[in-house]
Image (cartoon, rainbow, N blue to C red):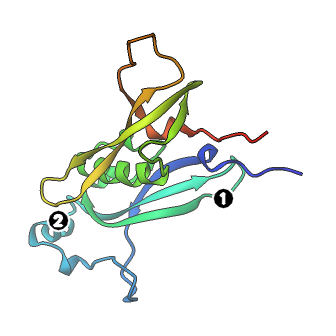
Amino acid sequence: MRQPLPEHRTALSVRIVRQGKPTGKYHDSRMKIEDLEDQDAAEIRAGKALLLEVQLIRKARATSLPVVVETLFNRVVPPESVGSYSHPEQIIDPYLRRDATDLWASEFRTLELQHVRFRGRTYLVLSLEDTDREHADEGYLTGYGICRRVDYAPSGNPCNPKRLPLHELKPVTKRTT
């Protein structure tokens, strides 16, 4: 019997598409162009920007259909941002890249003080790197964790923390014998 792929082995990607019109349903957070700030609405009407949505896509296998995991609406960015990306760092627009990276990083559900594997070595996640947004109290995840290697350290010399990409960290599972 075939076992499903573990969640951390599924492929993630980011797709940026034109945003559809709001449906008017309670849970629909899409905005109309008229409801945007005046400058953003003017840029959209002039064709200098588009109202886009960022979709986080998961695909378990090459032959399986992609599934939209999460969506961010109401992003006003240049038209050249439309497309598919295998990683958020490929996105040119810095604000869109920040939002897509935050969405991407939160999908891995890595926790502080969790043991993880990275390139065959065991690390302890000391903290998840985040950055202050300046205009709000909440920060955003950058897609990296600050980790310390725990499977080896020379006597009296603890390993320095490293900045490791969350999408490459795999949780350590305890084996019961």
Quarter assignment of residue 74: bottom left
Percent position (x, y) of residue 96?
Answer: 29, 52
Q: Residues within 10 Å of mark 2 (few under 14, many from 20)?
A: few
Q: Which residue is mark 2?
A: 46
Q: Residues within 10 Å of mark 1 (few under 14, many from 20)?
A: few
**Which numbered circle lies on residue 133?**
none
Q: Which structural element holds mark 2?
A: loop
97 shown above or below 74: above
Image position of 135 (left or right of 115): left
Depth order, front residue of 157/42: 157
Percent position (x, y) of residue 138?
Answer: 23, 59
Image position of 136 (left or right of 145): left
Q: Say which of marks 2 and 1 sits in front.
A: 1
Pointer 2 with pointer 1, Cβ within 8 A: no
Percent position (x, y) of residue 36?
Answer: 18, 74
Q: Which residue is mark 1?
A: 65
Percent position (x, y) of residue 148?
Answer: 41, 28
Image position of 135 (left or right of 142): left
